Structures are given as structure tokens and as C-alpha cells.
Amino acid sequence: MFAVAAAALLVTIAMALTRAALGPTIFDRLQGANTIGTCAMLLLAVLGFLQGRPEFLDLALVYGLLNILGTIAVLKYFRHGNLGHPGDAEERSS
Amino acid sequence: MATVLDVLSWGLLVTGGFFCIVGGVGLLRMPDFFTRMHAAGIVETMGAGAILLGLLLQAGLTLVAAKLLMIGLLLFLTSPASTHALAKAALVRGVQPLLASREDPSPKP
Amino acid sequence: MFYVAGTVAVLFAFWVLLSGFFTPFLLTSGVGSAIVVVWFSRRMGIVAHEGHPLRLSMRALITYGPWLLMEILKAGWDVTRRILHPRLPISPTMTRFKPSQRTDLGLIVHANSITLTPGTISVEVGPDEFLVHAISAEGGASLDGSEMDRRVRALELAS
């Protein structure tokens, strides 16, 4: 049964990846990346149970922390960073 | 007793997987950024909650269960923060939300 | 001082929970890490000025938790139906309304609860006005003076 949950999570990651690739705004891509992060965290937890190695939960915890930090950092970068021009062009063209 | 717990946790795992896929479908189907955030919210609350609860039932009263609870608490506290930050940044940067007018509740293409 | 010691104790409990090993070396480094983290936080000025971190009424909190869980389940099922419906029956709305909470913590709890409930996202949060994006017109219209608003108000009043 863990395999079913793991497969569902993989399918969700694929769909979020499609959304991140399609865009159209940087926020859509960021939302896709955020969802991938959440699913990867859950996938790590499920994989730990699937293989009987609960150490994977520590990795999941760290991944969760990195996920929120990454999202906030990228948002802040695009809002205040001086290399935000690609984001600008992307938004205007959409 | 053990089989009851097993069946319950399997049900929760499958339910969680279902909600994750629903969130992914919504992420692809929804017409604009703000409505897609609601679909992602399904993954983060319903999907993650059900899967973590299912794993919690499998873990029993061990350190593993404590770690699972910690992951759940982390997700519970941080996912609204990142969603709010994304929505606010998008609005500040001028992403116009697609709005349905009050007279016509039917969805726009 | 009591607050600092409490923070060190909580951080050390967190360390033990994460590691699960009780060798002298790991326990000592846990105590050391907790003390160093609290020292750094004090230098950065992020622990100093909140004397009571959780000013919420515990009695109201006990009923609020399960109620919020039920709301999340109901709203989640509603959004799931909308996503899977062939015609995608959504009617996104932006709603402005005035929350009745007075403390910062009450406002934060209210805004987080709104975002945590699928189908509504708080976009702008302030003491005078919330701007909320809802996936359905009904969800947006029911936010002003909602039961959630009343319950969070009760949560902070009794403190």
C-alpha cells in the first residue's frame, strides 16, 4: 500500500513539473516548485516506510525546512534582487 | 486490532494519494495563477494530512511517530506562510486575478 | 532569565527527539547547540521582547482545533468536487472585509486559518482589512463576520 501512495505522489510531482515548465508567470513556476517540494517530502517519508528505513524521516524534515526557505528566498530575490530582469520580461510577455 | 489499524492506515494512504493527484490535476486545469494556488492547497492540506496520518498509524508509539508529528506540524505552520507570501508577491507584481462577475457565476474560459 | 532557560530546555528536547541517541557526547553537544542558538538569537534580538509567546485561551483553543479540522475537511471536499467537475464550476472572487480581532496574534491565527482552509487564501493582511481570494463566490461572501472570525475573537478575548 505504501507503493500506491508513492506512485500517486510521483504522478503529482510529474503534473507539478508540467505546470512549472508551462509557466506562464514566474509565480506559476514557483508554485509548481513548491508543490514538488511538498510532494518530495511526503515521498521521502513514504519511501522510508516502504524500505523499512525510518532514517528517511530526518531527510524529509530537512527537506520541508529547505522547501519553505527556498520559496521565500526566491520570492524575495525576484522582488528585490538586481538580477530580476528575466522575471520582468516573462511577466510582460504573458 | 492490528488488522483494523492496518486497514485504516491503508485507506488513509490511498485517500491521501487520491487528494494529491486531484491537486495535481487542478494545478494543470485551473485557468489562472490564483485559482491554481487553491489546487496546490489541496495537496498541502488534504493530501499531506491523510498520508502523514496513515504513516502515523503504521508507526505506533515510537520516535518515528514523534518525527512524523513534527513533519505534520512543520507543514501545518509553514504552508500558509509560503502560500500567503506567493499570493501577496504575485498581486504586488501585478498579476491580475481572473474574476467572475457577480451576475454571471459561470466560469470563464 | 527564566524565559531564556525555558527556550534552551525546549531546544534541547527538540534535539533529543530528533537524534534518539543518548551517548554522553551527543547529549553534551545538544546542550551546547541549544545554548549557542539562544545566545545568537538574543544577539539578533528575536527572542528578547515577547514575554508570553502564546497569549491564547487554552479552553477556546481545544474546541477551535477540531472545528478548524472539520472546516478544512468540508472545504477540501468542496474544492475537490469543483476540480473534478467536467465543467470546472469555479467563480473566483476577491473579498475585502474587516476582521474583529484586536491583537496581532489573533490576526495571525485568523489569516492562517483562512489560508489553511482550501478554497480561500488571504492575500493582504492588516489590522483594518483582510483581502481574501476565494475560489467560489459563496466562499467569498461568507467570510465577513464568519464563524471563524467569531471563534478566533473568543480565542483572544479570554486571555
Image (spheres, coloured by chain):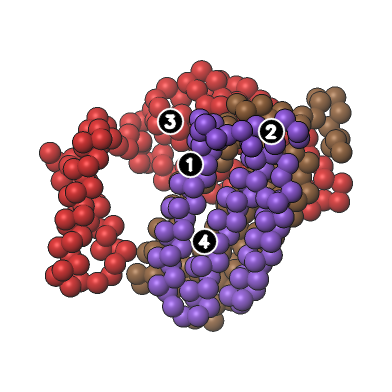
Residues B102 and B81: in front is B81
Specify the amino acid type for callout 2. Answer: Ala
Cα–Cα gap, marks 1 and 3: 27 Å
What hue represents chain A? purple
Q: Local crowd at mark 1 within 10 Å, few (<14), some, or many (≥20)? A: few
User: Which residue is label 1 attached to?
Assistant: A73
| Residue A89, label in figure | 2
Sequence-earlier tag: 4 or 1:
4
Residue A71, horizontal then vertical, whole percent: 52, 45
Colour displayed for chain C in the image of the structure: red
The quadrant in which the C terminus of chain B is found is: top right
Residue for badge 3: C106
| SS label for mark 4 | helix
Q: Are marks 1 and 3 in contact (CB under 8 Å)?
A: no
- Left or right side of C156 for A83: right
Q: Earlier in the sequence, mark 2 or mark 1?
A: 1
Q: Is residue A62 above or below residue A31?
A: below
On whether disc 2 and disc 3 are found on a single subunit, the reply is: no
Considering only vertical position in the picture, is B34 above or below B54? above
Q: Amino acid at mark 3?
A: Gly
Q: Mark 4 and 1 residues: CB-CB less than 8 Å, in contact?
A: no
Chain corresponding to brown in the figure: B
Query: Depth check: C111 or B39 in front?
Result: B39
For mark 1, give the secondary structure: helix
Q: Which residue is mark 4?
A: A41
Q: Earlier in the sequence, mark 4 or mark 2?
A: 4
Q: CA distance from mark 2 to mark 3?
A: 40 Å
Residue at 25 percent across and 35 percent down: it is C44
Residue under the point 51% across and 33% down: A81
